[in-house]
Amino acid sequence: MKYFLSLNIVFILLLTACDPVKKSQLSPSGKGSFKIPVWSSPFLKGFEKALFHTSLDVAGKHLSGISIIKRTSDTSFHFTFANEIGMTYLDMEVFRKTYKADYIFEALNRKSFLKVLWSDFSMMLFSSSERKPVRMYLDNESEESVYFFLRQSMYTWINTKEMNLTRLVGWSNYFDAVMINFSEYDAGFPSEIKISNPRIRMVLTFSLLGH
Amino acid sequence: MRTFKVFITVMILCFGSTLLQAQTKPLSFADAEDVRKTISESAKTTNSIEAGFTQTKELSVIREKIISAGVFYFKKEKLLRWEYKEPFPYLIIFNSNKIYIKDDDKENHISLQSNKVFREVNNILIGAVQGTLLSDTKNFQCSIADLHNQYQATMVPLNARIKETLSEIILYFNKSDYTVDKLVMREVSGDYTRIEFSGKKINQNIPDEIFFIP
């Protein structure tokens, strides 16, 4: 038990030391107490399905095509990504704590890559203000409010004027930081979403075609 | 009410399958050879094709469709311009041993000699629009069935690499001019893509500039 405790402390220290967010761009705000906004992933608020022009760059390879994200239950989404001619690259069900791969194109069928992808999707699809943030900052450039959630080790950017989620930054696993940007909101849903995992050189972009 | 439901189910099972069999009549080996020869002869005299297409990808697990549309130009021997207009512009040009892809502002040049996957995509697309895929006995096992006004050629891949992705390709040939009306690619995953051609123009003059790779 003692061993696990010290191991956890080491990991927390490591995570804090390798923070994926540049602290120079943030100013501490709302010292003592601050108002906690109610927010959730745009995929949770009455979302059914959306079609995206999608591109995936990973380890020097570029794939493009069309993807669909469909909510299949209160706790699951289905993600399918196919090239323009129609051949499927990825077909998977995403749950908050696991995933089920229905079909994966051979070149992408690597467990470590799929785990990172699932973790990123889990953050993008299921994040919400169900937990209380421990710190609040102000982004010096965008002037957006930034909240830090210790349990998920995740930073959340909120445009408080529009009450839109604009950015999530956290960890896909102990080694891979992830940045998810939501932009070009139209009727409460982002038209552009970009997921970046710098360590594995992965960039996944979604441009909304319809929902 | 329950008896009625059972009765309806039995009727559908009995007559539904009979109806399907009546619509698709597999050809004997000799008849299939004749059709194959006729299609092959027709392909020899086809120097160019221009057509519109509608592509529907059916996602089996979530029962959704992704629909795209565009135009294509083919010119003998190996020039193909496959251009999507909907839901977003996307262009592929196959010119001899080179491929050019334009996706939004991104341009990509690929050599067919160094890329096996694109070489197979090129062979399948050109073979399908021209009808010459039927003669590719090295990579496909083919069976032909007679439909009302079409011949249905079912191509099962023999090539291990193609088999990883596709379980079969079905080509529908128009009986009046032996050109391809429709193409269905069934994937191992259970999904399939249907490409339907419209407004076909055969042997019209298509300028070479259409296939120019910048």
Image (cartoon, rainbow, N blue to C red):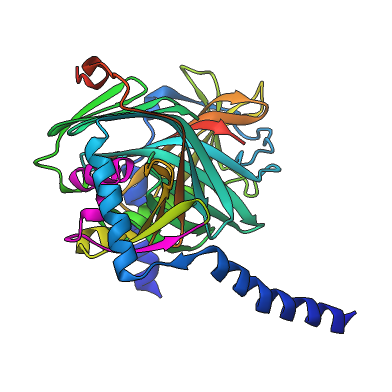
Q: Quadrant of the N terminus of chain B?
A: bottom right
Is residue B70 placed above or below A143 in the rendered structure? below
Which of the 4 image quarters holds residue B208?
top left
Residue B63 place in picture, x, y as percent:
59, 55
Is residue A98 placed above or below A160 in the rendered structure? below
Asked if residue A159 lies in the magenta stretch, the reply is no
Q: Quadrant of the C terminus of chain B?
A: top left
Residue B165 place in picture, x, y as percent:
32, 58
* A69 to the left or right of B118: right
Q: Is residue B41 visible?
A: yes
Query: Which residue is at the far right?
Result: B1
* A46 to the left or right of B20: right
* A29 to the left or right of B176: right
Asked if residue B131 lies in the magenta stretch, the reply is yes
The segment highlighted magenta reads B118-147
Residue positioned 9% across, 41% down in the render = B113
Task: In this rendered view, identify the residue nearer to me: A103 or A84.
Answer: A84
Residue positioned 61% across, 38% down in the render = A42
Is residue A67 placed above or below B204 in the rendered structure? below
Which of the 4 image quarters holds residue B106?
top left
* B206 to the left or right of A23: left
Q: Is residue A181 visible?
A: no
Residue A11 place in picture, x, y as percent:
34, 56
Query: Which residue is at the far bottom?
Result: B3
Q: How many marks?
A: 0
Residue A62 place in picture, x, y as percent:
27, 38
Residue positioned 63% across, 24% down in the render = A186
Residue positioned 56% across, 68% down in the render = B22
Task: In this rendered view, identify the residue nearer to me: A187 or A91.
Answer: A91
Which of the 4 image quarters holds residue B159?
bottom left
